[in-house]
Image: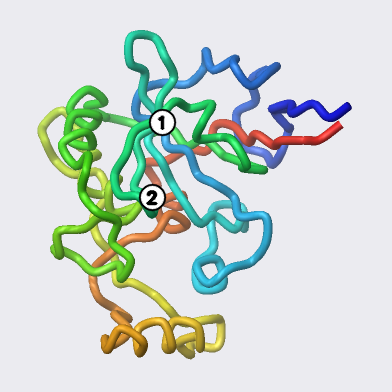
């Protein structure tokens, strides 16, 4: 019989370790924690960016609680949506949790994220085009108590280790009659995981038994 268990693994030094016994034990999570999804295999995003501790992160969502219920808000292919954390985790093999160090206005951050609900997903990853991708939602939402944004935009990268823009992204934008936005301001979930204000707290892995 197959059971899905959400296990906390001891990983690298500098990462906090707390006991998480099952899928519904989320007592250690806080509003504003970042949920970084680790891809099970390489893809177009992880080929050009790399997450903290070399993890291939390709998505990020925002954790919050509503009337005590664990929830996430995220920008996925359906647009900006909220759903229960348990539903979000279905089908995912590994998720790491990042927590903001220092000043985070979690209440305002969650409100700002909710103000984006219903916006379409940004399939071309361009700024200020009325659509939002996953790490862009984080960039737009996270503020300190003075209202200052915690995540500035960075020059986007679509090239591999050789410095060449990958064939995937060249073809991707050519099909849309667009130039690859190499160097344009933006974000990506891997880079967000490296920010100094983010500390990776947990690594969860789903194991079939």
- Across and down, in percent, residue 133 comes to 32, 56
What secondary structure is marked by label 1? loop
Residue shown at 64% from the left, 20% from the top: 18
Residue shown at 68% from the left, 18% from the top: 22
**Total of numbered circles in the picture?**
2
- Across and down, in percent, residue 147 comes to 11, 35
Q: Residues within 10 Å of mark 1 (few under 14, many from 20)?
A: many
Query: In the displayed structure, does residue 17 sit left or right of residue 64?
Result: right
What secondary structure is marked by label 2? strand
Compared to residue 140, the image places residue 105 above or below, namely: above
Task: Report how far apart the C-alphas of labels 1 and 2 lie in the structure.
Answer: 18 Å
Residue shown at 52% from the left, 17% from the top: 28
- Label 1 vs label 2, nearer the camera: 2
Query: In the displayed structure, does residue 43 sit left or right of residue 145?
Result: right
Query: In the displayed structure, does residue 17 sit left or right of residue 66?
Result: right
Query: In the displayed structure, does residue 4 sit left or right of residue 98?
Result: right
- Across and down, in percent, residue 64 comes to 36, 24
Compared to residue 16, the image places residue 76 above or below, namely: below
- Quarter that holds the N terminus: top right
- Across and down, in percent, residue 29 comes to 47, 21
As drawn, the label of residue 33 is 1
Residue at numbered disc 2: 76
Are dots 1 and 2 in contact, CB under 8 Å?
no
Taking the view exactly as shown, the residue that stands out farthest to the top is: 67
Residue shown at 26% from the left, 86% from the top: 178
- Quarter that holds the C terminus: top right
Q: Which tag, 1 or 2, sits closer to the chain's start?
A: 1
Q: Residues within 10 Å of mark 2 (few under 14, many from 20)?
A: some
């Amino acid at each position: 019989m197959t059971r899905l268990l959400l296990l906390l693994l001891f990983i690298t030094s500098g990462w906090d370790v707390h006991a998480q016994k099952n899928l519904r034990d989320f007592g250690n999570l806080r509003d504003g924690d970042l949920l970084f999804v680790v891809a099970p295999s390489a893809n177009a995003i992880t080929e050009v960016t790399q997450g903290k501790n070399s993890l291939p992160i390709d998505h990020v969502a925002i954790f919050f609680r509503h009337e005590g219920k664990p929830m996430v808000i995220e920008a996925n292919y359906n647009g900006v949506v909220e759903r229960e954390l348990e539903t979000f985790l279905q089908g995912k093999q590994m998720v790491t949790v990042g927590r903001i160090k220092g000043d985070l206005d979690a209440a305002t951050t969650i409100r700002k994220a909710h103000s984006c609900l219903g916006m379409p997903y940004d399939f071309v990853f361009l700024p200020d085009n009325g659509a939002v991708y996953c790490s862009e939602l984080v960039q737009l939402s996270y503020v300190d108590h003075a209202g200052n944004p915690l995540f500035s935009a960075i020059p986007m990268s679509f090239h591999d280790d050789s410095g060449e823009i990958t064939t995937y992204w060249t073809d991707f934008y050519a099909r849309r009659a667009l130039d690859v936005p190499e160097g344009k301001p933006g974000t990506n979930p891997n880079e967000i995981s490296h920010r100094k204000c983010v500390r990776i707290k947990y690594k969860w892995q789903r194991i079939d038994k």
